[in-house]
């Protein structure tokens, strides 16, 4: 590659075919300012986390010891705890605390002991070593990545040693853990926790089987009774026309924003939010800020200049507190790391996570204006750098112009595109705000190859400036901490760092880790293994103290107000949400059962091949099976690509396929599945850009895979030979014709949708409905059905030009006859105002509920005059119900993060 003196190999597989297969994940870290070499993909086990995330980035460091691999850290289970000592501590001058989390690192090049294991504090300072005899046993497990080893100090520091509890975490895969436990038994390593977990797991399985048996009998009886009571077969058309009230009555009331009982025991935070201090109205802002926005402004100002707890205070600031009887000692209550005779570094900034529509943008503009007169430091630019998605980039310029009085006008530079003006610190002195995109920042940071070229500051460009503040709009874009986008954003230099997002947690608490790392949270929480050990793992296991620490963290760095909080007082019309359950028609059930059997067979093969080189192929096939199961719930025509099945069977026998017209068509169909499913490019971990698929059936962004092919001529996923870019297949130049639809052919979900739309028109012809689907193919199927029913509609999806989208939105806003908008979930979940409609139908469910909530919020927002109704269409007894369960787990996690006890109870817990 240009700018590199050596050939870099990108390998996302576990091992070369024919070589010894590595059964355990490879671990590495991505320190700020570094240029990683290569990476490796751990298949992991199949769960919703796997479905949400892509593989590891090509630009992750592969460390010879255990460092960064989020999937391994999260999925590994505790096997046992080894009580030992840290030796050689006489040279450690740091302040050691009982309960302090420490890191264990292999030191294979130690001149005295090749098995040496270092013990480091959270600042990577060496405390000492694990005793030689124990290191001799543990070193090979750490070297082959079969165990993740963590440590906690359990006693006071002596002259020569210090007590430590060494925790051993291993795979949760049932096949691999059998071999691992046998090896550990032979080495006499502790397995106490593993045995307890094994017994608990047996008890859980037994209880679940008994409950399922009981529920199955009840469901069978209920299904039979219901069928006879309604006088119709399941899923068939009713003899009478249902009213909208009938449909609502049949649906299950559902409010995803409600706080469930598990969370309620932690108490609400509304009273604390309502009593936040209020800033004065900035004289430079033309709009009069609402009371909660003035409170938000004061919170922003305070968090740009955070103050440590005063001497004698029991307060906690960014998880730091003073020791009760030692005013010169600060302890991080999350990692228990302590420092003496110096002050911990506090992050300037935080996360503004207000609901969409509450004015995050105007609050941030107000902060810029209120702080303008206070920013007197010579070494820091006065300019604010704003990173935003391209679709909302222009919104910042227009909002600044709208809200700032002309006499206090801000000088705004839009830094994007091929004709953008080169910038440096001198140029930036002429501007107050610079607006750019995540892609521009990423491109600038990774423009040069080699580790040394990634250092900052630089002579010009975005990384040459020490900004007054950085603002990440839609900050969840950096939720993957290993992505190039997140690494680039974290390397920007600034005094203050802000994240604006209505969804700080989309999938898992790992999303929150990436944001905490960006804002420079100290005390060790910028390292994933410590963040996971202190927060993610305890919360996932239901540990109350872990939940408490999570809430303390969120109250320290994050401000979130919801639209439904009484003191916000937006006076929005009521929002009612329902789950409308549907039964498949007999012919649909037959197709679903066949696909389900196929998926179960693929899952069995995946589990058998988990440690082998065929795992990646089987995994890909399994995801395709799951996607088909979800699609058949919408309409059986969506999953009619039998040629895909044939292609997958062919690939199970050989690494690549010939690019015959038939195989190209099948590969294009697979590529479209990847695009519709919003998959990430496995190399850059960003959404697929200029998507292509290889002859071994792996989808990439073209520029990423082109670079790999030029360097090594192999697929980074399976190591198949890719001699040139001629082995890549692009999407068809013209969108494929929609499948021929017989409007008389029955489809349970189409029937349910039409019933809702017809009943709505009968009740009130002024009600307009947005029908969201993640699959444009389903929208193609719905179109002729609406036409046949005499329902006038518009459409908006990612294939349309900006002019065509605008025309559809105008029709929704101004044409009284246009009562339905067919909308792509990916396109319409951000950046649009859809208040002309007051009813939403979610035709299918997405794994990440935050995406759906954002789509609903496009309708239920400021400017909405009608009561808003949301129907979620869910097919009973199918994978769609599992999606709802996964969504609810993620909603609980989000709500738990923002639940708090009263201030008094918090102090009691901290003091304890």
Image: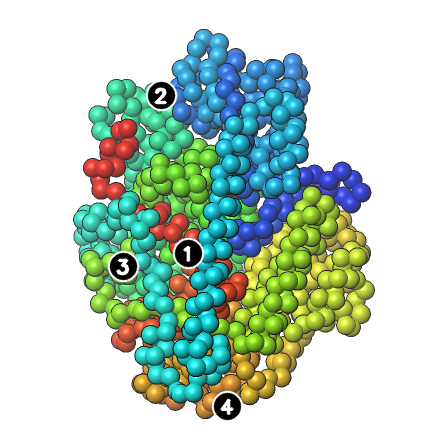
Which is more foreground, mark 4 or mark 2?
4
Question: Gap between marks 2 and 3, in whole Å?
Answer: 46 Å
Secondary structure found at label 2: strand
Residue 759 visible: yes
Question: Gap between marks 4 and 2, in whole Å?
Answer: 76 Å
How many dots with numbers?
4
Which of the image's four quarters has the C terminus? top left
Q: Residue at x 78, y 45 (%)?
A: 17
Report which residue position mark 2 lands on: 340
> Is 289 left, or right, of 467 in this rendering?
left
Report which residue position mark 4 lands on: 788
Mark with earlier residue (4, 1): 4
Which is more foreground, mark 4 or mark 3?
4
Q: Residue at x 64, y 22 (%)?
A: 187
Are the residues tagged 2 and 3 within 8 Å (C-beta)?
Answer: no
Q: Is residue 595 above or below residue 43?
A: below
Report which residue position mark 3 lands on: 408
Residue 373 visible: no
């Amino acid at each position: 590659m240009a700018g590199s003196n050596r050939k870099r190999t990108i390998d996302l597989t576990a091992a070369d075919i024919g070589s010894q297969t590595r059964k355990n994940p490879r671990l590495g870290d991505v320190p700020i300012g570094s240029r990683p070499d290569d990476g490796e993909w751990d298949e992991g086990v199949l769960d919703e986390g796997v479905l949400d995330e892509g593989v590891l980035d090509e630009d992750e460091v592969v460390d010879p010891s255990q460092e960064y691999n989020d999937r391994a850290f999260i999925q590994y289970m505790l096997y046992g705890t080894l009580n030992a000592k840290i030796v050689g501590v006489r040279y450690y001058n740091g302040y050691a605390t009982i309960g302090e989390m420490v890191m264990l690192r292999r030191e294979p090049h130690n001149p005295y002991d090749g098995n040496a294991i270092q013990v480091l504090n959270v600042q990577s300072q060496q405390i000492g070593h694990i005793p030689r005899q124990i290191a001799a046993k543990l070193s090979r497990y750490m070297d082959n990545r079969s165990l993740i080893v963590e440590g906690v100090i359990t006693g006071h520091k002596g002259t020569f040693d210090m007590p430590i509890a060494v925790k051993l975490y291993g795979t949760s895969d049932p096949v691999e853990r059998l071999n691992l436990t046998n090896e550990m038994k032979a080495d006499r390593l502790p397995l106490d926790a593993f045995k307890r977990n094994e017994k608990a797991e047996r008890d859980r399985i037994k209880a679940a089987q008994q409950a399922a048996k009981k529920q199955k009998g009840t469901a069978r009886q209920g299904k039979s009774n219901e069928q006879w009571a309604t006088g119709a077969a399941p899923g068939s058309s009713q003899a009478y026309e249902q009213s909208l009230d009938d449909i609502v009555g049949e649906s299950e009331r559902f409010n995803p924003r409600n706080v469930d009982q598990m969370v309620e025991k932690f108490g609400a935070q509304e009273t604390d939010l309502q009593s936040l201090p209020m800033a004065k109205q900035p004289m430079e802002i033309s709009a009069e800020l609402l009371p909660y926005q003035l409170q938000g402004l004061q919170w922003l100002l305070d968090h740009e200049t955070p103050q440590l707890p005063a001497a004698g205070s029991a307060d906690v600031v960014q998880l730091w507190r003073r020791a009760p009887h030692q005013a010169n000692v600060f302890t991080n209550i999350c990692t228990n790391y302590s420092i003496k005779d110096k002050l911990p570094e506090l992050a300037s900034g935080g996360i503004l996570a207000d609901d969409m529509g509450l004015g995050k943008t105007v609050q941030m503009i107000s902060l810029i204006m209120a702080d303008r007169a206070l920013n007197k430091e010579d070494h820091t630019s006065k300019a604010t750098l704003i990173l935003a998605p391209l679709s909302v980039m222009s919104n910042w310029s227009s909002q600044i112009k709208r809200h700032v009085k002309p006499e206090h006008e801000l000088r705004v530079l839009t830094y994007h595109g091929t004709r953008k003006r080169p910038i440096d610190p001198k140029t930036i002195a002429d501007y107050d705000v610079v607006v750019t995109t995540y892609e521009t920042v990423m491109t600038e940071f990774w423009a040069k190859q080699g580790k040394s070229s990634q250092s900052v500051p630089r002579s010009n460009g975005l990384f040459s400036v020490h900004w007054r503040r950085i603002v990440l709009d839609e900050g969840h874009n950096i939720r993957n901490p290993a992505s190039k986008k997140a690494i680039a954003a974290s390397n920007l230099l600034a005094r203050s760092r802000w994240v604006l997002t209505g969804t700080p947690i989309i999938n898992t608490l790992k999303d929150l880790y990436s944001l905490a790392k960006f804002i420079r949270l100290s005390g060790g929480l910028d390292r994933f293994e410590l963040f996971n050990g202190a927060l993610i793992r305890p919360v996932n296991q239901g540990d109350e103290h872990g939940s408490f620490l999570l809430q303390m963290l969120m109250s320290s760095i994050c401000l979130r107000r919801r639209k439904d909080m009484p003191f916000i007082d937006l006076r929005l019309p009521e929002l009612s949400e329902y789950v409308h359950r549907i039964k498949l028609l007999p012919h649909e059930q037959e197709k679903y059962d066949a696909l389900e059997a196929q998926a179960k067979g693929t899952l069995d093969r995946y589990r058998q091949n988990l440690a082998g080189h065929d795992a990646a192929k089987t995994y890909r096939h399994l995801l395709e099976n799951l996607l088909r199961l979800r699609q058949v719930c919408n309409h059986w025509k969506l999953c009619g690509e039998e040629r895909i099945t044939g292609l997958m069977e062919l690939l199970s026998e050989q690494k690549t396929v010939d690019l015959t017209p038939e195989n190209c068509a099948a590969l294009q169909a697979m590529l479209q599945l990847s695009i519709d499913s919003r998959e990430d490019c496995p190399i850059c971990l960003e959404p697929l850009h200029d998507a292509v698929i290889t002859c071994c059936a792996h989808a990439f962004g073209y520029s990423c895979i082109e670079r790999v092919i030029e360097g090594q001529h192999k697929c980074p996923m399976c190591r198949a030979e890719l001699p040139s870019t001629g082995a890549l297949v692009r999407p068809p130049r013209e969108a494929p014709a929609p499948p021929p639809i017989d409007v008389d052919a029955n489809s349970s979900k189409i029937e349910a949708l039409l019933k809702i739309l017809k009943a709505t028109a009968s009740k009130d012809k002024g009600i307009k409905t947005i029908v969201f689907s993640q699959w444009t193919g389903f929208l193609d199927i719905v179109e002729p059905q609406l036409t046949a029913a005499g329902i006038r509609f518009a459409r908006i999806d990612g294939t349309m030009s900006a002019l065509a989208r605008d025309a559809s939105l105008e029709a929704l806003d101004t044409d009284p006859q246009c009562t339905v908008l067919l909308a792509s979930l990916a396109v319409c979940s951000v950046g649009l105002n859809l208040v002309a409609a007051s009813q939403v139908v979610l035709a299918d469910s997405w794994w990440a509920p935050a995406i759906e909530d954002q789509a609903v919020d496009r309708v239920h927002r400021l400017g909405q005059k009608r009561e808003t109704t949301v129907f979620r269409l869910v097919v009973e007894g199918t994978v769609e119900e599992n999606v709802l369960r996964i969504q609810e787990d993620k909603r609980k996690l989000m709500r738990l993060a923002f639940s708090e006890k009263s201030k008094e109870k918090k102090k009691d817990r901290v003091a304890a």
